[in-house]
Image (spheres, rainbow, N blue to C red):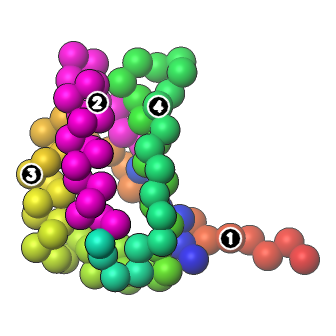
Amino acid sequence: MILETVAIQVKQEKMSEYEVAFRDASKIISSMKGYISHELQSCLEVKGKYLLLVRWETLDDHTIGFRQSSAYQDWKKQLHHFYDPFPVVEHFENVDLS
């Protein structure tokens, strides 16, 4: 499993509108091959700051399957205009500590 993390800063006056749009856009990402789950967290200390966590079966499911799909174009259209600045996306994998 791969964990995609996205640190998002939304224009403060657009927070409520963003959350509604994200709820709708969630249908897009959750329908993709390799999608496992996602959650959106709101920062308590910084207004307009969010953390998006998405679990994928493989890195390619996100970087190729989703990012290179027509569905991603819909995702961009619904959400990218809320960001200021554009978020940083990183991918993590579990460290085996056994």
> Which of the 4 image quadrants contains residue 12?
top left
Q: Earlier in the sequence, mark 3 or mark 1?
A: 3
Residue under circle 3? 77
> Mark 4 Cα within 10 Å, few/some/many (few <14, many 20+)?
some
The residue shown at (20%, 29%) is: 17
Whether the residues at callouts 4 and 1 have beta carbons within 8 Å, the answer is: no
Magenta span has 19?
yes
User: Magenta stretch: dominant SS?
Assistant: helix
Q: Residues within 10 Å of mark 2 (few under 14, many from 20)?
A: many
- Name the quadrant of the N terminus: bottom right
Which circle's residue, 1 or 2, is located before the other in the chain?
Answer: 2
* Nearest-to-viewer mark from 4 and 1: 4
The residue nearer to you, when weighing 96 against 23, is: 23
Q: Position of residue 83 (x, y in %)?
A: 23, 36
Q: Is residue 63 visible?
A: no
Up-down: is 36 above or below 16?
below
Crowding at dot 1, Cα within 10 Å, few <14 / some 14-19 / many 20+, comes out as few
- Res. 10 mark: 2
**Residue drawn where x is 48% and y is 71% of the image:** 36
Q: Which residues are magenta?
A: 7-30
The amino acid sitting under disc 1 is Asn
Q: Give the answer, above or below, for where 28 lies relative to 33.
A: above
- Can you tell which mark lies on residue 57? none
Instruction: Check if residue 23 falls in the magenta segment.
Output: yes
| Mark 4 or mark 1: whose residue is earlier in sequence | 4
Label 4 or label 2, whichever comes before in sequence order: 2
Rounded to the nearest angstrom, the CA distance separating label 3 from label 1 is: 32 Å
Q: Quadrant of residue 9?
A: top left
Q: Position of 80 compared to 36: left or right?
A: left
Query: In the picture provided, is 51 more to the left or to the right than 81?
Result: right
Mark 3 and mark 2: Cα distance apart in space:
15 Å
